[in-house]
Image (cartoon, rainbow, N blue to C red):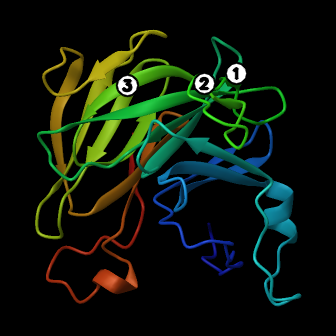
Amino acid sequence: RKTHKFIKELVLPDKSHVGSIAVDNHNGNVWVCCYEEKMKCAYVRSFSLKQLEDYQFDKGWKTITYEQSYPLVTLKRASFMYYRYSTQAQEGRLYVGYYRQKADSVSTVNCYEINADGGLAEAPNQNRKNYNDPAEMPYVMQKISIDGGAQGFATNEDMIAVLTSSGSMNPSYLRIFKHEGEEDIDATVNGGNLVVPQWDLPPMGEEIYIYDNAMYICFESGAFAYRARECDHMDRVLVLK
C-alpha cells in the first residue's frame, strides 16, 4: 500500500465475470463471484489466504484452485458481494447481490451465514428433483431489497450503503439506509429506510467497503479498457470518513 510495488497476479480456473471479491479474515478465505454456465446460476467460490500467499503462476504455470464452491440458485448472477463479521451474532456473513441495469427495477441482496468451518451454512434442498442435484444448498438468512443499477454494497450494524452507476458519462450515486435488525429489509429509495438520499460521485463506481469508521470506494474508469473514453477517470481509491 505504501510503495505501490506490484506483488503478484492470480490466474483463476474459469472465465467468470469477477464483479467482486471479499476477504474473510476470521477464517482466512477469499471469496470470488462466479457463474456456472451449465446450471445458469450464480456461484461463489473461495480459496485460502495461504494459497494466495504461496501462489506463483510462473512456478508450474497453473491456475489457483478453489477450495469451496456453492451454487446460489436464487440469483441469476453474482455481480457483487460483501463480507461482514457481526459482533452481535458473533458470526461472519456474506452478502451477494445481482446487478440489474434498469434503475427503476428492484434487485435483491442475499445474506448467507458463514459457519465455524469457514463455509456457507446450508439447509436441505427443497427443490431437489434427482440424485444429481445437491442434497443441501446455502441458506438465505436475510434478503435486502435494493434499487436497480447497484454496483456495490456494504453494511455494518447501523447502516446499509448502496453504490449505483450506469455508463461512463453519468455520475455514480451513493445512498445510505438504516440497517434494521435480522429481518428482511427494504433498502430501496421508496422503502422508508433512506437516511442519505444521494451523494453524486464520479462515473463508473464499482465497489465499496466499510472499515474502521471509513468507507472505501473504487471505480472501474481507470481500467485499461475504459481509458480511451471521454469521462472522468478515477484511478485511485476514494476514502470517506
Residue that badge 1 annotates: 91
Q: Position of residue 99 (x, y in %)?
A: 32, 49
Above/below status of 93 relative to 173: above
SS class, disc 1: strand
Given the image, on which type of amino acid does mark 3 rest? Ile
Q: Position of residue 236 (x, y in %)?
A: 41, 68
Picture quadrant where residue 27 is located: top right
- Please tell me which residue is depicted at 81% across the width and 88% down the height of the picture: 61
- Please tell me which residue is depicted at 58% across the width and 28% down the height of the picture: 112
User: Of marks 2 and 3, which one's residue comes earlier in the chain?
Assistant: 2
SS class, disc 2: loop
- Using the image, tell me which numbered label, if any, was put on residue 139: 2
Instruction: Judge depth for marks 3 and 1 and give the one in front.
Output: 3
Q: Nearer the viewer, residue 39 or 241?
A: 39
Given the image, on which type of amino acid does mark 1 rest? Glu
Please rate how many residues cluster around mark 2, counting C-alpha atoms within 10 Å: few if below 14, some from 14 to 19, many from 20.
some
Q: CA distance from mark 3 to mark 1?
A: 18 Å
Above/below status of 171 relative to 176: below
Residue that badge 3 annotates: 144
Above/below status of 77 relative to 190: below
- Please tell me which residue is depicted at 88% across the width and 88% down the height of the picture: 60
Picture quarter with the C terminus = top left
Picture quarter with the N terminus = bottom right
Q: Position of residue 147 (x, y in %)?
A: 22, 36
Given the image, on which type of amino acid does mark 2 rest? Tyr
User: Of marks 2 and 1, which one's residue comes earlier in the chain?
Assistant: 1
